Image (cartoon, grey):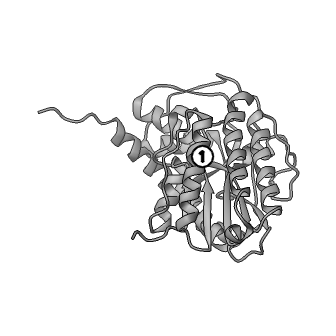
Amino acid sequence: MAAATTEWIIGRGLLGSAIAQQLGHDAYAAQVRWEDPELAVEDLRTSLSAFLAQAPSSWAILWTAGRGVTSSTHDQLDVEARVFHAFLDLLREYPETRLDGGRIFLASSVGGAYAGSTAPPFTELTPTAPLSAYGEVKLEMEDSLRSLVAATALRGLIARITNLYGPGQDLGKGQGLISVIVESYVTGRPVSIYVPLDTLRDYIYVDDCARIVVAGVDRLARETSGTVVTKIIGSMGALSVGAIVGEISRLRRKPVPIVTGQGNSTGQSGDLRVRSIVWPDLDALASTTMPAGLGATYRAQLAQHILPSHT
């Protein structure tokens, strides 16, 4: 008989894949037909039953799924949100005895939550002020999780994550400034940057973020039933877009081809500095320097663009 798995990671994109690697053991895996919301919920129902049937009394589900970005429409985001809400409804169908000891993690967004907030650096106590449908939907998902946990014996962790970057980022989502700039450097194709170069963002390397998530989910098990912890996850050090461009140019000794002022910057804040005051000791797990993170991202993209030799 296969060993029981304690964690189920829903969504194996950039963050989900990194979390799976950080766990150090196999997490539960399931195929979900995300292209159709009804089929996705059906798959999630079947997989939830199978997961809980074999999981120990203390288990964790980590929701890192989603292709929505700041520029996504409300209709596009609503589809993703409906699947998440439906999944939480599936959990409500289980008896308290099976939910007690369970933990739910949700990957949310600093940019979505605080785009319209004032007086940075923002903390977990800063009132949220979304400026886009993306932010509104992310906060709706947070509220949905809080409602579920308050009504059950579950425990919840909401991570408001800063700008995530690293090898393997899906460039098709139109998100991930560092990865987009690195790709421009590798391919020589100009990249359009539609926010001012003095725009401040907190960038966190994906492996660092995954380490903090895993440590946070582990700590959550020591909280009382019905508790939801909201934590900002980032490097706690902001850089301007211009500084990122300059650092890549310095490391590779060649200017990055950029075009500024192109596109729609609606919903974007000029200053998203943050400071976490919740479980701040975990912030030390974000130890990757920007040069090291840029170097790893560059090498990964370079390897992807090297054509195989023909013999």
Q: Quadrant of residue 187?
A: top left
Q: Position of residue 297 (x, y in %)?
A: 45, 47
Nearest the viewer among 306 and 228 is: 228
> Which quadrant is the C terminus positioned in?
top left
Q: Residue at x 75, y 51 (%)?
A: 273
Nearest the viewer among 202 and 1 is: 1
Q: Residue at x 78, y 34 (%)?
A: 132
Q: Position of residue 302 (x, y in %)?
A: 36, 40
Q: Is residue 45 left or right of residue 189?
A: right
Q: Is residue 264 left or right of residue 215?
A: right
Which residue matches tag 1? Answer: 65
Q: Residue at x 49, y 51 (%)?
A: 30
Q: Amino acid at mark 1?
A: Ala
Q: Position of residue 229 (x, y in %)?
A: 76, 64
Q: Is residue 85 above or below residue 98?
A: above
Please identify the residue farthest to the bottom as the structure is shown. Answer: 222
Please identify the residue farthest to the left as the structure is shown. Answer: 311
Q: Is residue 180 visible?
A: yes
Nearest the viewer among 23 and 248 is: 23
Q: Quadrant of residue 59?
A: bottom right
Q: Is residue 277 visible?
A: no
Q: Position of residue 96 (x, y in %)?
A: 74, 68
Q: Residue at x 50, y 43 (%)?
A: 169
> Which quadrant is the N terminus positioned in?
bottom left
